[in-house]
Structure formats: C-alpha cells, structure tokens
Amino acid sequence: MRKKGSNGQRLDNVERDLSQVKRDLDRQRDEYERHIRRHVIDDLQETRYNGKPLYSYADIADRHDISTSAVQRIAIAEGLTRRNKA
C-alpha cells in the first residue's frame, strides 16, 4: 500500500483494476478455447453416408480460424485421429 497523500492510492486502484481485467480476459479466453474445441470435436465426428469424414482437417481449421496442427492435436487428444492404426 502506498502513501495516502500521494498518487499511490490511485495507483493501487489502477493496479487492482488491471489485475481484475487480466483475470476476466483469461477466463474469457479459456471459455472461447473450450467452445472452439467442442465445435472441432463435433466436426471431427461428422461423417458422410458411407462413414467417411465429412470435413478434412483443413476444412475444420478454416471453419474455426485455427491451424490444422491445432485440429490434429485436438483429434489426437480426443482419440479421433484419422490415421490407420498399424
């Protein structure tokens, strides 16, 4: 805590407000990432009538404005990878 008579109290308030904004930003970023992840998982599970995937990794990446490697990481983590098991 800074001296009361100086600008210290205002600086304390600004620092407190800034930390609150940072926490809110982190929370919103986490919610957004979970939201995008859920949509990517849904797209990975979509299939055509013959059982083949409806969307390619590139299609999914374009739809959600993320990289294809991010789509691949999500697919691996959720067990939805499209590689043939040897």
Image (spheres, rainbow, N blue to C red):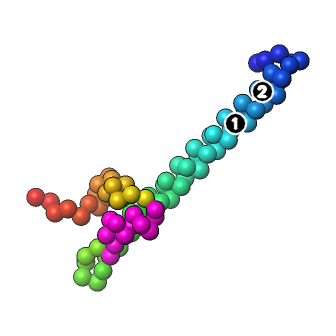
> Label 2 sits on what residue type?
Leu
In percent of width and height, residue 54 lies at 32, 76
**Which numbered circle lies on residue 11?**
2
Residue situated in front as seen by the camera: 8 or 30: 8
> Label 1 sits on what residue type?
Leu
Predominant secondary structure, magenta span: helix
**Mark found first going from the N terminus, 1 or 2:** 2
Task: In the displayed orientation, state which residue is furthest to the right.
Answer: 5
Give the residues drawn in magenta, as a range.
54-65
In space, the residues marked 1 and 2 are separated at their CA atoms by 10 Å
- Quadrant hosting residue 52: bottom left
The residue at 42%/66% (across/down) is 62
Task: In the displayed orientation, state which residue is furthest to the left.
Answer: 86
Examine the rendered structure and indicate whether residue 52 appears above or below residue 20. Answer: below
Residue situated in front as seen by the camera: 60 or 23: 60
- On the image, numbered disc 1 is attached to which residue? 18
The magenta stretch spans residue 45: no
Which secondary structure, mark 1? Answer: helix
The residue at 55%/53% (across/down) is 31
The answer to whether 67 appears left or right of 3 in the picture is left
The residue at 24%/82% (across/down) is 50
The magenta stretch spans residue 64: yes
Examine the rendered structure and indicate whether residue 78 appears above or below residue 52. Answer: above
Examine the rendered structure and indicate whether residue 60 appears above or below residue 76. Answer: below
Task: In the displayed orientation, state which residue is furthest to the bottom.
Answer: 49
Quarter of the rendering occupied by the N terminus: top right
The answer to whether 85 appears left or right of 76 in the picture is left
Which secondary structure, mark 2? Answer: helix
In percent of width and height, residue 12 lies at 76, 26
In percent of width and height, residue 60 lies at 38, 67
The answer to whether 84 appears left or right of 39 in the picture is left
